Structure formats: structure tokens, C-alpha cells
């Protein structure tokens, strides 16, 4: 039975659905790219779209401005070649973090917009689940904007990267590629159900020439919109130009992207 959404955008469980235990969600914020408001808005979206209590953690170098509901912890050290800051999310696999996360955790990028219930992301079977890269759907390459992992059983990945960071970052184009290869080698790789995670610029913006006058839309069945590259949510709200060309404003983003 489908879930119901109230006037405030809060998701409620289907009739007869169990509430389960505490859901563990992890995000990261470092440097000046994203303000604390991104963390706070992500927390608000998660809380509205889960039927069970949330354990929400943020690994950050500056907890100022982050709401009290979010547990903030320092980002564990790891070797990062110059210009590869996105690889910092491998700190999620550090043994220093594993004890904080429980048995299973979901990692979410800060620039996501959550538009549907998140319970299925905790219910889908599999040890490690990640987005299949939209640009290479016939490969096993992943996009690491949303992934679920078992913290206590994944610390070897962190140790491997720290031992051979230069070689790994030369061999793999993105951190998502490295994660999928590593997990595939151990028989733990799985991908989210098709359509749950949509690319805003590829799946929401209409094709040419319709995007010049048609508003971007949420694909049917999507639960999370991923803003990889440009635009980010504030730009998408206003409309503008991205690598796909000009596109119209998407004012409906404000209904979801809020604290």
C-alpha cells in the first residue's frame, strides 16, 4: 500500500507498515563549498521522509551553524592527492567512524533533493548498494552520491586506499568507480532499484527544444534527485544554463529543499 504525504510534506507509513529501528544517515561537509544550511536542509528532508527515528551524523571540519539534532564529528585523516577533494568521502569507511554508525548506514551527498520516502533504501537487500552511473548504464561504474554500506565490515577499504592512494586515484576516474570495483571484487556490490535516484540535469530537464519553455519535472518513481556537477539546487530553482544548455526554473524544488 502506498505511503501518504501530509500537507507539510511529511511522509507517513502505509497502513500496517512497521516502524523498524533507528535509521543511520551520514553526510560530510568540509571547506567553504557548502554552508551549514545544506546540512540542516538535508536533515529536514531525511526526517520528513523516514517513518522511523533518525541517527544523523555529519563528518565536518567546522560544526558551527549545524542544528543540534545532527551529531558532528571530525573528518578522519586520509591521504588526498591535490585536486581530488571528492575522494574525501572515503573517510566514511574509517575505523574511527565505524563505531558511530551502527550495523548499516546510508551516505548522502549534501546537494541532494529528497522527493520521496526513504524507507526502501534501508529495506532493499544487499551488503553494499550504490547508484549505477547514468552516463555508463551498461557498466558497473557507480555514482557515490547515495550509497549504503556496513561500517564494521568495510574498514579494509579505507586501509587499502590509505596504503596506495596515489595508484588508486590514477587508476579510477571517480571515487564511485573505486567503490564499485572494490565491492565487486568481494561479491558485495549491488545497485539501487532503477529510477530511485534520478539525475536532475539528465532526467528532470526536458530535451531540446522543449527545455526552453517546459519546467523540469520529477521522474515517476524517483525518491532522490542528484545534482552532480551543475546546476545545484539554488540554480535549478531559478533556471539558467548548464552543460545541457538553457533550462527553465524549477520552483517546485523549494517544496522539498528546506529545513
Image (spheres, rainbow, N blue to C red):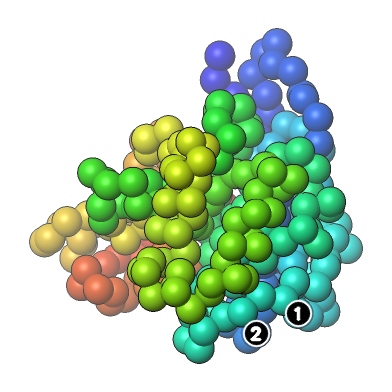
Q: Residue at x 57, y 66 (%)?
A: 161
Mark 2 and mark 1 in contact (Cβ < 8 Å)?
Answer: yes
Whether residue 154 can be seen here: yes
SS for dot 1: loop
Tell me if 229 is positioned left or right of 205 in this view. right
Q: Which residue is mark 1?
A: 61
Q: Nearer the viewer, residue 83 or 232?
A: 83
Tell me if 166 is positioned left or right of 256 in this view. left
Q: Which residue is mark 2?
A: 31
Q: Residue at x 74, y 45 (%)?
A: 152
Q: Is residue 37 above or below residue 208?
A: below
Q: Position of residue 68 (x, y in %)?
A: 88, 63
Q: Is residue 16 above or below residue 4?
A: above
Quarter of the image for residue 54 reads top right
Q: Position of residue 86 (x, y in %)?
A: 52, 73
Q: Nearer the viewer, residue 229 or 107?
A: 107
Q: Image quadrant for the C terminus? A: bottom right
Q: Are there few (<14), some (14-19), or many (20+) residues within 10 Å of tag 1?
A: some
SS for dot 2: loop
Quarter of the image for residue 123 reads top right
In 3D space, how far apart are the residues under numbered discs 1 and 2 (Cα atoms)? 7 Å
Q: Position of residue 34 (x, y in %)?
A: 61, 77
Tell me if 111 is positioned left or right of 138 in this view. right
Q: Which mark is residue 171?
A: none
Q: Position of residue 141 (x, y in %)?
A: 35, 52
Whether residue 47 can be seen here: no
Q: Specify which label sits upstream in the sequence, 1 or 2.
A: 2
Q: Residue furthest top?
A: 16
Quarter of the image for residue 38 reads bottom right
Q: Image quadrant for the N terminus? A: top right
Q: Is residue 152 above or below residue 227?
A: above
Amino acid at each position: 500500500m502506498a505511503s501518504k504525504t501530509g500537507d507539510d510534506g511529511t511522509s507517513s507509513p502505509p497502513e500496517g507498515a512497521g516502524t523498524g529501528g533507528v535509521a543511520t544517515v551520514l553526510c560530510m561537509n568540509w571547506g567553504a563549498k557548502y554552508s551549514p544550511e545544506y546540512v540542516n536542509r538535508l536533515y529536514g528532508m531525511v526526517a520528513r521522509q523516514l517513518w522511523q527515528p533518525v541517527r544523523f551524523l555529519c563528518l565536518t571540519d567546522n560544526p558551527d551553524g549545524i542544528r543540534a539534532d545532527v551529531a558532528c564529528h571530525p573528518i578522519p585523516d586520509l591521504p588526498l592527492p591535490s585536486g581530488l577533494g571528492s575522494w574525501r568521502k572515503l573517510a566514511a569507511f574509517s575505523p574511527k567512524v565505524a563505531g558511530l554508525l551502527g550495523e548499516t548506514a546510508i551516505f548522502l551527498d549534501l546537494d541532494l533533493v529528497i522527493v520521496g520516502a526513504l524507507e526502501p533504501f534501508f529495506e532493499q537487500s544487499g551488503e553494499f548498494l550504490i547508484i549505477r552511473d547514468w552516463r555508463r548504464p551498461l557498466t558497473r561504474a557507480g555514482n557515490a552520491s547515495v550509497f549504503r554500506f556496513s561500517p564494521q565490515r568495510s574498514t579494509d577499504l579505507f586501509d587499502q586506499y590509505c596504503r596506495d592512494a596515489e595508484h588508486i586515484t590514477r587508476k579510477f576516474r571517480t571515487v564511485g568507480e573505486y567503490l564499485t570495483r572494490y565491492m565487486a571484487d568481494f561479491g558485495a556490490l549491488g545497485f539501487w532499484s532503477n529510477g530511485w535516484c534520478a539525475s536532475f540535469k539528465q532526467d528532470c530537464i526536458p530535451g531540446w527544444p522543449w527545455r526552453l519553455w517546459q519546467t523540469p519535472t520529477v521522474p515517476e518513481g524517483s525518491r532522490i534527485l542528484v545534482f552532480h556537477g551543475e546546476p545545484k539546487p539554488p540554480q535549478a530553482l531559478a533556471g539558467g544554463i548548464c552543460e545541457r544548455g538553457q533550462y527553465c526554473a524549477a520552483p517546485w524544488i523549494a517544496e522539498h529543499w528546506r529545513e
